Image (cartoon, rainbow, N blue to C red):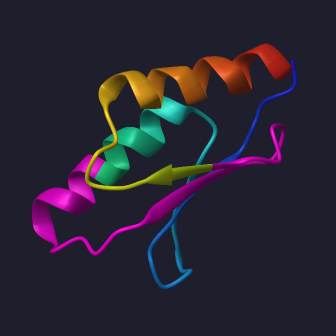
């Protein structure tokens, strides 16, 4: 089975995490957010989708789910 690779990228363009599951990227973002002062926007990129998910102060749980489902459908 082919797996996607997601990258969590901060507002300065630094890759802060690389994971195979979108849920793990979301958890890592929450962990970082709990210990650091986040300056938006952050991004998540996907090797399969070749698309960028932008995280800002208005990003909802449903936005995370929609992007995850979109990427899953492409596998």
* Span colored in magenta: 30-52
Image location (x, y in percent) of residue 29: 34, 52
Q: x%, y% of residue 24?
A: 44, 37
Residue, far front = 58
Q: Is residue 59 above or below residue 21?
A: below
> In this rendering, would 25 be left or right of 74?
left
Q: Is residue 43 magenta?
A: yes
Task: Give residue 41's quadrant in the image.
Answer: bottom left
- Residue 3: x, y in percent? 78, 30
- The residue shown at (25%, 48%) is 30
- In the displayed structure, 10 sits above or below 48; it is below
Q: Nearer the viewer, residue 60 or 2?
A: 60
Q: Residue at x 38, y 21 (%)?
A: 62
In the picture, residue 18 is in which quadrant? Answer: bottom right
Say if residue 18 shows up in the picture: yes
- Residue 53 shown left or right of residue 49 in the figure: left
Q: Name the image quarter holding the N terminus.
A: top right
Taking the image as shown, residue 30 lies to the left or right of residue 47, namely left
Foreground: 19 or 60? 60
Q: Is residue 57 magenta?
A: no
**Is 20 placed above or below 57 here?**
above
Query: Does residue 17 appear to the left or right of 72 in the view shown?
Result: left
What residue is drawn where x is 71% and y is 44%? 5
Where's residue 27, x and y in %? Answer: 33, 40
Q: Is residue 75 visible?
A: no
Residue in view at x 44 percent, y 31 percent: 64
């Amino acid at each position: 089975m082919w797996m996607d690779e997601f990258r969590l990228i901060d507002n300065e363009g630094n890759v802060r995490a690389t994971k195979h599951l979108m849920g793990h990227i979301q958890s890592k973002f929450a962990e970082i957010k709990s210990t650091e002062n986040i300056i938006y926007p952050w991004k998540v990129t996907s090797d399969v989708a070749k698309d960028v998910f932008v995280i800002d102060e208005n990003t909802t749980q449903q936005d995370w789910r929609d992007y995850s489902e979109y990427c899953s459908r492409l596998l």
